[in-house]
Image: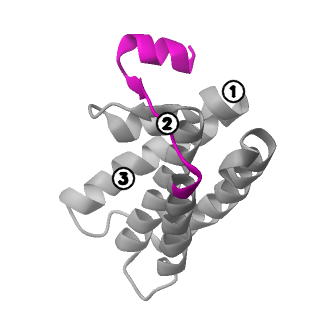
């Protein structure tokens, strides 16, 4: 599959991003990572870290010239990562999709879904992903940095 195939399937639409939009999304990531250090429950820290990860995936998609359509927007944004960064990121997108499901449970269904260890694991992962996305931007879309 490719992003063009996703576009043809109606899962994506064309999107023209800007340096300001990318900058704003990265500022949200920085804010969220900072906020995960707060004295919050593991559920909330996980949710905040998930939001930062989703924004990083959004940066990838927008810089590539696309935006996910409303239906299954989070899922498609996350699943686009290996299409953009390469097949070796498939496990990463699967991990983030599992986080998406867990975050939904913590947000809408019940308290105590996430352990402190799981929250810390996601926060660490997001920091690594941020470095990878920034590196990709500098290498492939310097005009947006």
State the image quarter where residue 126 is shown.
bottom right
Relative to 14, say whether 109 is above or below.
Answer: below
Which quadrant is home to the N terminus?
A: top right
Q: Earlier in the sequence, mark 2 or mark 3?
A: 2
Answer with the quarter of the image where residue 10 lies.
Answer: top left
User: Along the horizontal axis of the image, is 104 left or right of 94?
Assistant: left
Coloration mode = one colour
Q: Nearer the viewer, mark 2 or mark 3?
A: 2
* Residue at screen point 64% across, 31% down: 84
Q: Position of residue 119 (x, y in %)?
A: 49, 67
Residue at screen point 50% across, 58% down: 25
Going from N to C along the chain, the mark reached first, 1 or 2, is 2
Residue range highlighted in magenta: 1-20
Q: Badge 2 is on which residue?
A: 16
Q: Give the CA distance from mark 1 to mark 3.
A: 24 Å
Q: Are marks 2 and 3 in contact (CB under 8 Å)?
A: no
State the mark number for residue 87.
1
Residue at image mark 3: 102
Camera-near label (1 vs 2) is: 2
Q: CA distance from mark 2 to mark 3?
A: 32 Å
Q: Specify few, some or many for label 2: CA neighbours under 10 Å numbering under 14, 14-19, or 20 or more.
A: few
**Residue 94 in sight from this viewpoint:** no
At a point 47% along the width and 79% down the height, the residue shown is: 35
| Mark nearer the N terminus (1 vs 3) | 1
């Amino acid at each position: 599959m490719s992003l063009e195939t996703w576009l043809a399937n109606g899962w994506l639409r064309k999107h023209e991003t800007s340096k300001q939009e990318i900058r704003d999304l990265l500022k949200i990531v920085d804010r969220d990572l900072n906020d995960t250090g707060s004295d919050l429950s593991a559920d909330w820290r996980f949710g905040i870290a998930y939001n930062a990860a989703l924004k990083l995936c959004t940066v990838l998609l927008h810089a590539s010239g696309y935006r996910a359509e409303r239906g299954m927007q989070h899922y498609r944004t996350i699943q686009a990562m290996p299409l953009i960064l390469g097949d070796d990121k498939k496990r990463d997108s699967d991990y983030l999709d599992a986080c998406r499901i867990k975050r939904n449970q913590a947000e809408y269904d019940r308290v105590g879904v996430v352990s402190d260890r799981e929250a810390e694991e996601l926060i660490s992962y997001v920091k690594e992903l941020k470095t990878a996305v920034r590196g990709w931007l500098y290498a492939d879309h310097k005009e947006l940095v």
